[in-house]
Amino acid sequence: METLIIAELLFDLLLSGSLLFLAYKTLTCKELFQAIVFFIVFGLLLSVTWGRLGAYDVAMAEVVIGAGLTGALLLSTFMQLNKINNKLDEEKKQ
Amino acid sequence: MSTLFVYAIVGIGLFSIGLYALIMQKHLLRKLLAINIMGSGVFLLFVSLSMRSVTGVLTDPVPSAMVITGIVVAISATALALGLMIKIARKSAKAELCNLDQE
Amino acid sequence: MTRFFVVIVVSLLFIGVSYAILSLPQQAQGLSQAVYTEMGKSGVSNPVTAVLMNFRAYDTLLEMAVLFVALIGVYSLSYIKKEANLRLQSSVLQRLGGILVPFLLLLSVYLLWVGAHASGGAFQAGSMVSASAILMFLSGWKFSLFPQHTFVRLLLSLSLIVFLFIAILTLYMSKELLLLPVKEASYFIFILEAAATVSIGITLFNLFVAIFSQQKEKK
């Protein structure tokens, strides 16, 4: 029983530590693409956290929307921004 | 019992990190990520505090339901903001809000 | 200098809110007792679905309005080609999409059905529908779910229309907005959930497509 409680506490600390670390990396890492990937991983770990807290409905919504659809939206925006930048570079060369 | 407070503190931490980045970062996509992380922190705080009322296997369904609605609203707001951001990037050649002093 | 100031303010905020949270009582009543005593009248046995579609249906109605307005906002911002031809060319994606999409659609129908008595429901099913539609779109399948067609516009506003219709119906039947009658509650909830699934799925898909295939305006 004792070991189970310690294991649970360790799991909680690990999960919360990695959530905070991923949030920090999302907001401070240099590359924008990296930030988006970190954010997707953050969403996945957040859905694990919902499962840990017993909110399974929220976990399901989070894993599809928070990680999947938001990731797709962010990546397509990243693509659009790259396109705009490339176009600007070409115009500058001309 | 104490584990729920661990997640509540993590929620506040996420909110603070997000707020810091929202103020300090220039790029609009970073600002948007910061707002999303702040929202996640608020949801985490909300749900973990509601777990205090757990009696046996029964959990409080009202915060869960509100968080689900919140997640869907967050993604629609994010999509609208991304659309605005692309528009700004097209018009001003960079995805940043311009500083009035530099104009 | 600004950084220093911001760090101090944010950490003060963190400490203050943490102190407030930690000084809350260890046990609190919450709303679970109230929900579980009323569960018999709700027509479903999953408390989250009962809260979403019955007890706080007004919230869900307004949320559908939010989704609808967000889509209109994104569309009014962007110039989108009628035939979005920006598809990813990858044979792996095409094969994988062909295998995955039927299972995803099946899973979303299952989630919709299971929401009445276990974890699941309209939101999860709707987002699953939109995920499979995005997968189909990216792997280059020819299908049109874009709001140029009147039929798709009808589907996009379907849940709002159904919600408003049921709101008016319940106003007429039980003199209170969205107070579902106890006997027929499960049917009403199923209709609401099915409509919400379709609308959420297609709205989220169209939000993605609007961002993905935005074009520069032609002058």
Image: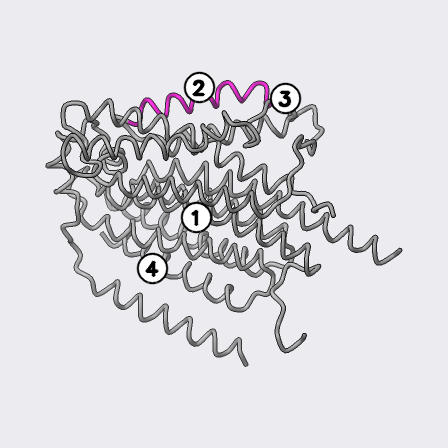
Helix, strand or loop at mark 3: loop
Q: Are marks 3 and 4 on the same chain?
A: no
> Alpha-carbon distance for marks 2 and 4?
39 Å
Q: Which mark is residue B9?
A: 4
Tell me where the magenta segment starts and ends, as one range: C94-115
Pinpoint residue C134: horizontal percent, then vertical percent: 56, 31
Residue B12, picture quadrant: bottom left
Kindly identify which numbered label has been placed on residue B74: 1
Q: Give the spatial CA distance, label 3 vs label 4.
A: 48 Å
Label 1 sits on a secondary structure element that is: helix
Q: Residues within 10 Å of mark 1 (few under 14, many from 20)?
A: many
Which numbered circle lies on residue A61? none
Q: For the point 49% across and 41% down, which residue is it? A: A67
Q: Residues within 10 Å of mark 2 (few under 14, many from 20)?
A: some
Quarter holding residue B103: bottom right
Q: Mark 2 and mark 1: span between their CA atoms?
A: 26 Å
Instruction: Determine whether B95 is above or below A37 in the image.
Output: below
